[in-house]
Amino acid sequence: MSVIYVLLTISIIVAIIFFVAFILSVKNGQYEDSYTPSVRMLFEDELVVKTTPKKDSKNKSN
């Protein structure tokens, strides 16, 4: 019977630790942006601008 009290105490302590971590993350702004993650998958990755290599006139040998 004493094992139940020990496990109950430990589970309450762990729950309090997770609750404090949640409150701290909310206060630090972890959950402020709720719009961007929902539309992130709709857009392609950043567009990569393909540039052609410029010919360097200094390196030309005649």
Image (spheres, grey):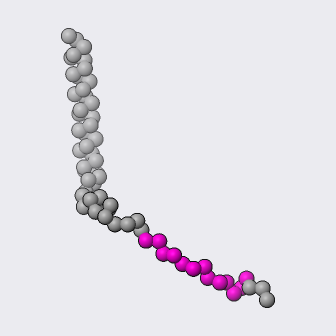
Q: Residue at x 22, y 11 (%)?
A: 2
Q: Quadrant of the N terminus?
A: top left
Q: Residue at x 54, y 78 (%)?
A: 51
Is residue 56 one of those drawn in magenta?
A: yes
Q: Residue at x 73, y 82 (%)?
A: 59
Looking at the image, residue 33 sits to the left or right of residue 49; the answer is left
Residue 27 vs residue 61, the one in the foreground:
61
Q: Is residue 27 above or below residue 45?
A: above
Magenta stretch: helix, strand or loop mostly: loop
Q: Is residue 56 above or below residue 1?
A: below
Q: Quadrant of residue 57?
A: bottom right
Q: Residue at x 25, y 49 (%)?
A: 26
Q: Quadrant of residue 35?
A: bottom left
As drawn, which residue projects farthest toward the top? 1
Q: Is residue 24 above or below residue 14?
A: below
Q: x, y (%) of residue 47?
A: 43, 71
Q: x, y (%) of residue 16?
A: 23, 33
Looking at the image, residue 41 sits to the left or right of residue 58; the answer is left
As drawn, which residue projects farthest toward the right? 62
In this figure, what is the number of numbered marks?
0
As drawn, which residue projects farthest toward the bottom? 62
Q: x, y (%) of residue 29?
A: 27, 54
Is residue 49 one of those drawn in magenta?
A: yes
Q: x, y (%) of residue 31?
A: 26, 53
Looking at the image, residue 62 sits to the left or right of residue 16; the answer is right
Residue 18 vs residue 61, the one in the foreground:
61
Q: Quadrant of the C terminus?
A: bottom right
In the rendered structure, which segment of residues is drawn in magenta? Answer: 47-59
